[in-house]
Image (spheres, rainbow, N blue to C red):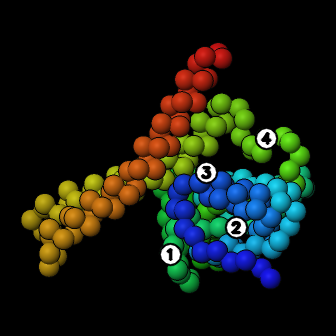
């Protein structure tokens, strides 16, 4: 009988990867994902290992092509959401993404912001990004997503001080925005520190 677990990891991709790998060690292989759902079947303990990849900066076409490329390398991939928005017929603008990746629709890349990748354990590190410049670029794309949200929250809070701002409870609005801002600030700081770490490593080897 398959095992179903409901979890939400937000932008903490490494934590999600550790969870999936811990399930593999316990003898469970991922077979299905949902917005909160992770469904597993029993397998030989530790036979598979997982890596979580951020792809929200890509267009839907690029994501599909990337998945085909990864499949050709022997990986199995699952689309997964980064947020918990439920939508149909929705269009989202992502100013931090590149090219056509700035536009996401419910029929395309919306709620498919990350890929969960699986391969059989072979004793080699499961890392898709190994070059320091590649790692810096990769983590910048994740950081910029959260940084954009932080800037928007600050703009909304500053706007609430303007005379034309209208709401029934300005104080409650500012408190909610402050909580949202802190929520986005944590991964922003975390990924900024990661970027700085790789930049220091790059300087060391230059």
- The answer to which of marks 1 and 2 sits earlier in the sequence is 2
Nearer the observer, disc 3 or disc 2? 3
The residue at which mark 4 appears reads as 125
Q: Secondary structure at mark 2?
A: strand
- How crowded is the residue under tag 1: few (<14 C-alpha within 10 Å), some, or many (20+)? few
Is residue 81 shown left or right of residue 65? left
Using the image as rendered, state which of residue 24 and residue 182 is in the foreground.
Answer: 24
Confirm whether residue 154 shows in the render.
Answer: yes
The residues tagged by marks 2 and 4 sit, at their Cα atoms, a distance apart of 22 Å
The residues tagged by marks 1 and 2 sit, at their Cα atoms, a distance apart of 15 Å
Contact between labelled residues 4 and 3, with CB atoms less than 8 Å apart: no
Q: Secondary structure at mark 4?
A: loop
- The answer to which of marks 2 and 4 sits earlier in the sequence is 2
- The answer to which of marks 3 and 1 sits earlier in the sequence is 3
Nearer the observer, disc 3 or disc 1? 3
Contact between labelled residues 4 and 2, with CB atoms less than 8 Å apart: no
Indicate the quadrant where residue 125 lies.
Answer: top right
The quadrant of the image that shows the C terminus is top right
Residue 196 picture location, percent across and down: 50, 31
The residues tagged by marks 3 and 4 sit, at their Cα atoms, a distance apart of 14 Å
Q: Secondary structure at mark 3?
A: helix
Indicate the quadrant where residue 160 lies.
Answer: bottom left
- The answer to which of marks 1 and 4 sits earlier in the sequence is 1
- The answer to which of marks 3 and 2 sits earlier in the sequence is 3
- Which disc, if any, is residue 206? none
Residue 35 picture location, percent across and down: 60, 75
Residue 165 picture location, percent across and down: 15, 69
**Which residue appears at 41% of the width and 50% of the height?**
186
Residue 92 picture location, percent across and down: 51, 69
**157 above or below 7?**
above
Is residue 88 shown left or right of residue 50? left
């Amino acid at each position: 009988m398959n095992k179903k677990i409901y979890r939400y990891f937000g932008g903490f991709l490494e934590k999600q990867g550790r969870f999936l790998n811990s399930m593999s060690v316990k003898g469970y292989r991922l077979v299905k994902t949902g917005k909160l759902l992770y469904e597993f079947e029993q397998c030989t303990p530790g036979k598979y290992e997982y890596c979580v990849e951020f792809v929200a900066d890509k267009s839907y076409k690029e994501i599909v092509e990337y998945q085909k490329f990864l499949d050709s390398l022997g990986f199995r991939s699952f689309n997964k959401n980064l947020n918990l928005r439920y939508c149909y017929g929705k269009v989202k603008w992502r100013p931090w993404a590149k090219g056509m990746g700035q536009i996401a629709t419910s029929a395309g890349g919306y709620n498919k912001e990350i890929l969960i990748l699986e391969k059989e354990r072979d004793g080699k590190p499961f890392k898709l990004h190994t070059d320091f410049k590649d790692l810096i670029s990769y983590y910048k794309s994740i950081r910029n997503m959260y940084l954009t949200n932080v800037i928007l929250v600050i703009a909304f809070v500053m706007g609430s001080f303007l005379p034309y701002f209208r709401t029934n409870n300005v104080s409650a609005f500012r408190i909610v925005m402050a909580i949202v801002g802190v929520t986005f600030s944590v991964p922003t700081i975390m990924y900024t520190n990661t970027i700085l770490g790789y930049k220091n490593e790059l300087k060391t080897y230059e």
